[in-house]
Structures are given as structure tokens and as C-alpha cells.
Image (cartoon, rainbow, N blue to C red):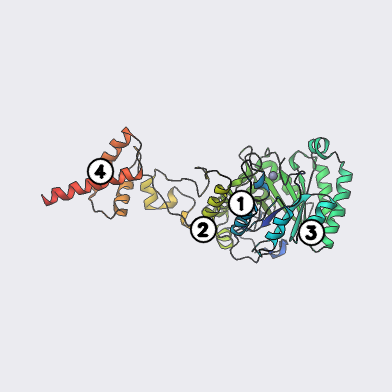
Amino acid sequence: MCGTCSGDTAGNAPAAANPTTNNAPPSTSTNNSVYPAQGGPKSSPYQSIQDYLSNVNKFKIIESTLREGEQFANAFFDTETKIKIAKALPVSSPQSYEDCKTICKLGLKAKILTHVRCNMEDAKKAVECGVDGVDLVIGTSSFLREYSHGKSMAIIQETALKVIEYVKSQGVEVRFSSEDSFRSDLVDILHLYKACDKAGVDRVGVADTVGGATPRMVYDLIRTLRGVVSCDIETHFHDDTGCAVANAHSALEAGATHIDTSVLGIGERNGITPLGALMARMIVTAPDYVKSKYNLKSLKSLEELVADAVQINIPFNSPVTGYCAGIHAKAILANPSTYEIIDPHDFGLTRYISINSRITGWNAIKSRVEQLGLSMTDAQVKEVTAKIKQMADIRPLAIDDTDSIIRSYHLDLQEVAQG
Ligand SMILES: [Zn+2]
């Protein structure tokens, strides 16, 4: 069972808000009134859809790699690994009470939140860890009510209000989330969220626990909820049907304030909205906001750290950090925005043009010749390109192969010249 999600999460499962935050104070308030004024993203080449409730220019991230991420099949984070990831994020961890306390004492530039079942015993334990916030969760769909905890909506509400009151009385931030929200009765959950809002909850959470929601369903539910509660709205999307990033964007457009992510999306089954993919999505939607708030250049090393910890490779199609060489060399070299919506330099990466294939064009080879510090006429570059294509027809070429063809051709030219 999944986390935001998990009614089964034992003990405390923290997550952190605002990972890789650039400039914001660690405990940036979740109160809407402190958000920067909203305006259309100036440097985005896309026309923004005007929507007065939209939060695409002022969203916040709840980083859940050490909470949701630990439900990933390969994940076993020992304390040392958690601390490493927490410092890199910063985020925090599940597994144990002690880890949670240790991470809280690191003094990271983020709020540390723990994720617990909505009952008094768990809430008390969470508060004892010294966290900044407690995320309460309970299943509200008929599936979960019948097959998981067996509680009625009336009992759920009564418990939720008592626990919220307790956590608030301890001066700790509190979020209440339903689990499997999209398969819950709409009237039931709106009623429940409204009561929690009235009781002073800081955030309510909506979770697509099974990953079946579409962007339109998300927009409708969040927009309706936005009209019912005045507190912040957190959202959690699983990626079973490949919609997790699109659903997150849709939620922000409808007025959600927070998105749950994990590094590389690791989590239950095929995981949740990946941090990197969300950054890629949002840098196109709201470039100024994203560049000013997040330390994008740490994304690659963060992904490598987590990939290593859970023993996976960064997928080739991972936005930004995946292998992304293209074949439209001429246009890319003349003006990268022709075929690229994201500038790799924003993420501390360099552009790589593929030059090892049978469809390599001479413009790409010319660029490589220049990179190698060699001098050739265009006619000569065309001739060596033909040689590279001939070889690529026979067998796959590595960059070293291409380079050595270029170098030996250049050497021949010099020998001819010296006569
Ligand atoms: Zn989850």
C-alpha cells in the first residue's frame, strides 16, 4: 500500500518541504498570503492560460523520497544513506523514530514533516520527534473503508478533528489527507475537508493512490475543493498510467499549492511525480519562479545519489538528466531553442549532439571537428562525414570511433599538404 497513502506506515515517515530550495527561508510559510504576486511567466515562449486560481507560478514541493521512496521495491535506506539524501535534498526519512529525530537535528533548510496514520498514538509519537509538521492520512474510498480499516466516515471525521486539535495545540503544522481520494465519494470527502479546514488544519491532501486519475479529473476535483476550503491543498499522484506530472500541473492550475515528489519518482509500484520531471515541466511554465527558487544544478548529482542508493540507472527518458542527444544538429547548433524547450545549462549540464549515427549530418561533424581543435574546409567535413556514415552502416559507433575517423582523416589531409 502506498504512503500518502499508506494506512500501514509504521511509526514515523517524514518528508520535507521545499527541496533544493535556493533562497527561500527554510520554514517558508504555507499561508497563501506570503506567496509572491502571481504574474505570467515572462520568459516562457508559450502563452500562459490565465486562471486566477492558478498556482503554477508559486507552487511548493513536498519531497517524499525518504517516505514514498522507501516503498520502492529496491529501497532500503540505512541511517547513513538517509542522512546523505536528506542533506542533499534536504528531505527526511521513514523507518524509525531515531532516524527522524536525527534528521530533525540536522538543521536542514527545509521543514521536516512526518507521515503517520490518523490516530492519536501515531500523532503523539510524531510530535515527540521534534518535527515541523505532521501529515495525517486515512483511507476514505469505499475500497479502503471496507477492506483496510473498516471505519465509517463519521468515525474518520471525529478522529481527524481530535488529532488535528492535539497537533495544533503542540504548535506543530498539520496536514490531513484522504487516501485514494479519486475513488472516494465526492460529497463525503468535501464534507470531511471542510470540517478539517474549520478545525484549523494547515493543509488538506488529495491523493491519487492508485494512479488512475486524468488531468481533467484532477482539475475538476481540485477546483471544487478550492471553493470549499481556505487552507493549502497538497496533492500526491502515482504514475501507474503515466499521468503523474501532467496531473501535478493540472492540480496547480486548479489552485493546489503543494506537489509531492520523490527523486526519480521512486515509490510504490512505478512511483509518483518525479522531482526532476516536475522541475522540467515547471521551468517551461514558470521559468523565472523555478530558476529563482530551486537549485537546479544539484538535480543531476541528487538523482545519481538516489539511483545509486536503490541500485537503478537513471532512465534514458528521464526529463533533463536522461540521455538526450538529438539528430537535429544544424538547427540546434544555430539556435538551440529550435528543437529544445529546456536549456541544459540551467541544470548545469552541457548539450550533446549525437554524431555517431548513419543519419549524422555534416553540420554536427563540423561542430565536433571544431571541438577537437582541428581545421577543415566544409568540403572536407562533408567528405569525412561520408566516411563516418559508411562506417555507421556497418557497425554501431562510439564517440571515440567517430573521433578517430575524424583525426585520421585530418592527419591524411596534412600529409597530403606536406606532400
Ligand atoms: Zn503514495
Secondary structure category for the residue under label 1: loop
The residue sitting at 67% across, 48% down in the picture is 251
- Is residue 220 found left or right of 394 in the rendered image? right
Q: Where's ligand 1: which quadrant? A: top right
Given this view, does label 2 or label 1 mark the residue nearer the observer?
Answer: 2
**Mark 2 and 1 residues: CB-CB less than 8 Å, in contact?**
no
Vertical placement of 75 versus 85: above or below?
above
Q: CA distance from mark 3 to mark 1?
A: 41 Å
Given the current orientation, which residue lies at the most extreme top position? Answer: 394
Beta carbon of the mark 4 residue lies under 8 A of ligand 1: no
Q: Which residue is mark 4?
A: 384
Amino acid on which the number 4 mark rests in the picture: Val
- Is residue 172 found left or right of 158 in the rendered image? left
Q: Residues within 10 Å of mark 2 (few under 14, many from 20)?
A: some
Vertical placement of 386 versus 223: above or below?
above
Q: Earlier in the sequence, mark 2 or mark 1?
A: 1
Q: Earlier in the sequence, mark 3 or mark 2?
A: 3
Q: Earlier in the sequence, mark 3 or mark 1?
A: 1
Q: Is residue 230 visible?
A: no
Q: Which residue is mark 2?
A: 297
Amino acid on which the number 2 mark rests in the picture: Lys
Q: Which residue is mark 3?
A: 127
The residue sitting at 46% across, 57% down in the picture is 345
